[in-house]
Amino acid sequence: MIGGKFVIDAVVHAYNHLPSNWTDPVLGDAMVELAYHLACDPPDSRYAMTREEYLIDWQMPDVTNFLFHESDTDVAVIHPLAIAAFKDGYSSVAKAVEGLSAHPNRFIGAYACVDPLRGKDALHDMAEQASMYKPLGLKLYPTSWDGTGPVSWRMDDPKLIYPLYEQAQKLGIGTVAVHKAVPIGPFAVGNAYNPNDIENAATDFPDLNFEIVHGGLAFMEETAWLLARFGNIAINMEIQNILVERRPRAFAEVLLGLCRVGGADMLDRMFWGSGGTLVHNQPGLEAFDRFEFPEDLLDSAGLFKPISQITEAHKANILGGTFARLHGLDIEALKAGIAGDEFARAPGEAPKAPFSTIGKELAHG
């Protein structure tokens, strides 16, 4: 917990950055470089990693210690990836199963992740993952690799994508998360990262909840209108932890932009996600705990009505309450599940020093 607020990290990846894991060198290298350049040069040098330390095949024991010994994260959700430019998808299903098995009270669930270009095989992949663990959601990426080049698709494609939603409902999966706003390679993607294609999906599948991952980092106006219009759309704030740590005013502009149409109530439709090993989690949590909107931005925020200062209740919802509500989780039960475990700390005890609890190949001397 931080500042008395329970922390659910809604997105954790155990990346395998190694070139030996790339099926396509162009896209693999592009994604790895994007990850590293997002992580490098933090304001506090204690949280910096060299390229050699960062671009590794992260193993679950290190991911676990990184999250729960070295930050105020209480519990987390694992997102395996299904990006065909990587042999294991970039973060493997096997690692998700390992984390869920080893620490079920800390890793409280995982999302299924499939490549829609696999067609009927993608439906099989969903069912197979559902047999391994009960997915909290389905994670999709709007660009994949067909073996010869990148292919992008839309969230409202009735032939390619709607069967996945139908399969999700059959499997008891009530949430679909889609990576938007941040393109993942140096090639033309058209309008694939614009969230407007969620409009038809949210209309045609009103019983599903849709998460816009990275929502607000691009296509702000489109995202704000979607959030205000559709009660079954929410914002997964992955990567925004980097903004609040390093560019708090830009972070404020993103949050206020997402609230511009629907007002401050939209803050309770956003939830925390770090990307797991993308960056160290603690600086972002500390920055968010002390964050306030700059008053000069509030003066002009809100299209139809003023937006008030962010409150501790808003922060508590963003850090844990909103995700728990959307997924029917009991925070008090989650607290009880981790009480006194190997990662528990005494009241007031600080997290362990950065990189002090992970493998020797990652540790700073």
Image (cartoon, helix red, strand yellow):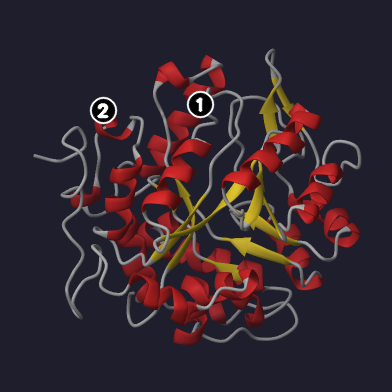
Residue beneath disc 2: 52
Q: For the residues marked 2 and 1, what is the alpha-carbon distance in whole angstroms?
A: 16 Å
Farthest residue to the front: give it: 131
Q: Is residue 148 visible?
A: yes
Residue beneath disc 1: 30
- Crowd rating for badge 1 (residues with CA inside 10 Å; few <14, some 14–19, many 20+): few
Q: Residue at x 40, y 45 (%)?
A: 278
Q: Tell me the kind of residue under disc 2.
A: Glu
Viewport quadrant of the C terminus: top left
In the image, residue 14 above or below residue 69? above
Q: Tell me the kind of residue under disc 1.
A: Ala
Question: Total marks drawn?
Answer: 2
User: Residue 4's x, y, as percent?
Assistant: 34, 83
Secondary structure under badge 1? Answer: helix
- First in sequence: mark 2 or mark 1? 1
In the image, residue 272 above or below residue 311? above
Secondary structure under badge 2? Answer: helix
Viewport quadrant of the N terminus: bottom left
Closest to the camera, between mark 2 and mark 1, is 2
